Amino acid sequence: MERPATGLGWPTRVSLGVAALWGAGLVIGALVVSTSTSEVVSHTPVPSAAPSTLTISRTLVEEHGLRVLIPVAIPLVAALLLAAVLRRRAHRGRVGAGVLGWSIVGVLGATSLVGMLTVGPLFLPALGLLVVGAALAEGRSEWAPTPHAP
C-alpha cells in the first residue's frame, strides 16, 4: 500500500494562502477604509454668510473601537488554524482535514451566516477557499508522486 504524501499539495497551499490574504485584507480594511461619512453643517449668526459643511469619514475601527477587529479577524484566524491542522495531519501521514479541520470550516460558515446582515458576506470568499483547501486535503494522495515500476 502506498504511503500518502507527507506535505500539502500546491492547490491546498494556494487555497489556504489566498484565504489568509483575504482575511488579512479584511483586517487592514477595517483599519484604513472609510465605512461611514457624516456631514456637519454649521450656521453662522450672520444672515448673509453661507453655512459651512464639514464631511467626516470614519473607518470601522474608528466607528466601533478596536473590539470590532475580533469578528473581522475570524477568517484570517480560521485560515491559519486550518493550515496548521492540515500541516500537522500531513506530517503524521494522515490524509484529510479531520474533524478539527472541518470544524474550523464550519465555525467560519456559521459566523458568515450569523453575520449576513453585517460583515458576513465579506467572509464568504474565505469560507469558499477554506472549503476548497480542506476538500483538496482529503484527496491529497492523488498529487503524491508515484514510483515508476522498473
Image (tube, helix red, strand yellow):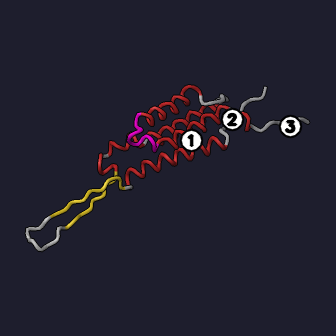
Q: Is residue 38 left or right of residue 93?
A: left
Q: Amino acid at mark 2?
A: Arg
Q: Earlier in the sequence, mark 1 or mark 2?
A: 1
Question: Mark 2 — residue?
Answer: 140
**Residue sitting at the far right:** 150
Secondary structure category for the residue under label 1: helix
How packed mark 1 is, by other alpha carbons closer than 10 Å (few <14, some 14-19, many 20 or more), is many
Question: Mark 3 — residue?
Answer: 148
Q: CA distance from mark 2 to mark 3?
A: 19 Å
Q: Is residue 89 left or right of residue 144?
A: left
Question: Mark 1 — residue?
Answer: 129
Q: How many marks?
A: 3
Q: Amino acid at mark 1?
A: Leu
Which stretch appears magenta?
114-122
How packed mark 3 is, by other alpha carbons closer than 10 Å (few <14, some 14-19, many 20 or more), is few
Q: How far from the left and from the top, in percent, is residue 31?
A: 37, 52
Residue at left 8%, top 71%?
Answer: 46
Quadrant position of residue 88: top right
Q: How far from the left and from the top, in percent, is residue 149?
A: 89, 35
Q: Nearer the viewer, residue 106 or 98?
A: 106
Task: Tell us which disc is closer to us: 1 or 2.
Answer: 1
Q: Nearer the viewer, residue 138 or 90?
A: 138
Task: Tell us which disc is closer to us: 3 or 1.
Answer: 1
**Residue sitting at the far bottom:** 48
Q: How far from the left and from the top, in percent, is residue 118?
A: 38, 42
Quadrant position of residue 111: top left
Residue at left 19%, top 67%?
Answer: 52
Q: Nearer the viewer, residue 98 or 127?
A: 127
Quadrant in which the C terminus appears: top right
Task: Tell us which disc is closer to us: 2 or 3.
Answer: 2
Q: Amino acid at mark 3?
A: His
